[in-house]
Image: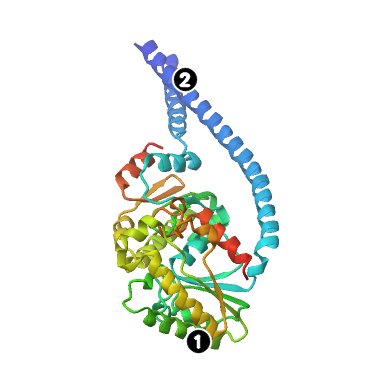
């Protein structure tokens, strides 16, 4: 009986030892993997960061001391991290009216008041997609004018750029949800362009690469027909770089 | 008699040693999760309405306002803005870091909820019921429509 107990306990012991050996091996292997991946990551990170910094120096320096203000297009641009050397004051659903009342999601003051804290060289504004459903385009323009006047007053030395409302896909345009269609977008853009001429500020037209033959956003550019995926967002920013 | 006492001592010794080994052995189920594999599995097995894009680590840290020293690794995928869908997986340095990052994640979800409430209310249910899981020093957030499916995928890791 005692022999059986000894045998049983020895068996448990062996299992325990084996488990422990396996544990030590796993830990060693984890440590090895971690060390390897850390060193690999460090190399990769260095390469990426070198690439990024050189890329930034070559391509994104033009945006130094700039700020982007606007709706979900700007929010997405910020989230993708395509341009890192700028400030962003954006919020999904932001309009030329709510820019005076709503803060960024992490902020505590109205977005327009963020311009009181620092003087910028370039200011990029993008509004309009959320206002397409407004009954009168004139009301949109009147409010946009108020935004421009306020920006000019608070940033007297800055160059102001207005990005046109970007096109949407044909499919989304056909749905015409809250008047969101390309004909309406073109109508609004014409009025924005005129306003920019009157105010002596720079109007940036929609990039040709964001339009197919019918003047709509290509289907592969967006999942909802409106918001740009990262690849098309980069196309937009490359266009912007060449037009400022 | 002496032999019997020595035998008893031997039993006790074997039992204690065995228990120690068994306990150490059982704890070998390491909480280290392959976060690359987990993110790939979530992307392949869960249906997302949006096109998700992977952020570089530096930008992921910025987006969540997390300090680099709190994490050993992180993977964040975000949507195009069309939806609030998102995957974020954080391998935290220790338990304290995990608590900090968990709070950052909760804050991010709350902020997103605030943003989408008046913009796209249809996205709010995803933000009200996200899949948020802690596994060892790893914390996993998946914002999608089919939270149950996401949770199943996470549970298998």
Q: Residue at x 56, y 58 (%)?
A: A235
Q: Label 2's element?
A: helix
Look at the image and tell me whether residue A81 can be seen.
no
Query: The disc numbered 2 marks a residue on which chain?
Result: A
Q: Position of residue B71 (x, y in %)?
A: 53, 52
Q: Is residue A177 above or below residue A19?
A: below
Report which quarter residue A208 is drawn in.
bottom right
Pointer 2 residue: A14
Q: Label 1's element?
A: helix
- Within-10-Å neighbours for mark 1: few <14, some 14–19, many 20+: few
Q: Nearer the viewer, residue B29 or B23?
A: B29
Q: Position of residue B85 (x, y in %)?
A: 39, 54
Pointer 1 residue: A149
Q: Quadrant of the C terminus of chain B?
A: top left
Query: What is the basis of the colouring in this image?
Result: rainbow
Q: Which mark is residue A167?
A: none
Q: Nearer the viewer, residue A68 or A3?
A: A68
- Cα distance between the residues tagged 2 and 1: 81 Å
Drawn side of residue B42 relative to residue A158, left or right: left
Q: Residue furthest bottom?
A: A153
| Sooner in the amino-acid sequence: mark 2 or mark 1 | 2
Q: Position of residue B130 (x, y in %)?
A: 34, 53
Q: Residue at x 49, y 67 (%)?
A: A74
Drawn side of residue A62 relative to residue A188, left or right: right
Query: The disc numbered 1 marks a residue on which chain?
Result: A
Q: Position of residue B112 (x, y in %)?
A: 39, 63
Look at the image and tell me whether residue B126 can be seen.
yes
Q: Is residue A163 above or below residue B6?
A: below
- Within-10-Å neighbours for mark 2: few <14, some 14–19, many 20+: some
Q: Nearer the viewer, residue A126 or A43?
A: A126
């Amino acid at each position: 009986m005692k022999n059986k107990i000894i045998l049983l306990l020895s068996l448990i012991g062996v299992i325990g030892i084996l488990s422990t050996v396996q544990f030590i091996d796993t830990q060693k292997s984890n440590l090895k993997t971690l060390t390897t991946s850390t060193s690999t990551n460090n190399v990769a990170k260095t390469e990426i960061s070198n690439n990024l910094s050189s890329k930034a120096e070559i391509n994104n320096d033009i945006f130094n001391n700039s700020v982007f203000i606007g709706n979900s297009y700007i929010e997405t641009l910020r989230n993708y991290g395509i341009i890192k050397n700028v400030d962003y004051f954006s919020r999904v659903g932001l309009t030329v009216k709510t820019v005076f009342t709503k803060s960024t999601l992490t902020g505590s003051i109205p977005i327009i008041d963020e311009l009181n804290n620092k003087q910028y060289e370039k200011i990029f504004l993008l509004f309009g997609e959320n206002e397409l459903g407004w009954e009168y385009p004139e009301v949109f323009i009147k409010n946009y004018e108020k935004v421009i006047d306020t920006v000019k007053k608070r940033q007297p030395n800055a160059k102001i750029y207005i990005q046109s409302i970007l096109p949407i896909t044909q499919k989304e345009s056909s749905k015409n949800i809250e008047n969101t269609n390309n004909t309406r977008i073109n109508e609004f853009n014409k009025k924005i362009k005129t306003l920019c001429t009157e105010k002596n500020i720079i109007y940036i037209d929609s990039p040709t690469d964001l339009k197919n033959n019918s003047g709509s956003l290509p289907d592969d550019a967006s999942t909802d027909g409106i918001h740009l995926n990262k690849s098309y967002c980069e196309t937009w920013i490359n266009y912007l770089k060449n037009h400022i | 008699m002496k032999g019997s006492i020595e035998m008893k001592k031997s039993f006790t010794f074997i039992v204690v040693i065995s228990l120690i080994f068994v306990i150490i052995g059982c704890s070998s189920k390491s909480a280290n999760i392959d976060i690359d594999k987990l993110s790939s599995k979530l992307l392949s097995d869960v249906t997302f309405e949006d096109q998700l894009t992977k952020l570089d680590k530096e930008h992921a840290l910025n987006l969540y306002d997390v300090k680099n020293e709190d994490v050993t690794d992180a993977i964040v995928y975000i949507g195009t803005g069309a939806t609030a869908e998102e995957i974020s997986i954080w391998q935290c340095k220790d338990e304290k870091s995990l608590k900090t990052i968990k709070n950052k994640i909760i804050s991010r979800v709350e902020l997103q909820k605030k943003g989408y409430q008046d913009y796209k209310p249809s996205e709010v249910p995803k933000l009200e019921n996200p899949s948020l899981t802690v596994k060892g020093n790893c914390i996993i957030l998946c914002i999608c429509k089919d939270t149950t499916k996401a949770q199943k995928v996470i549970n298998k890791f």
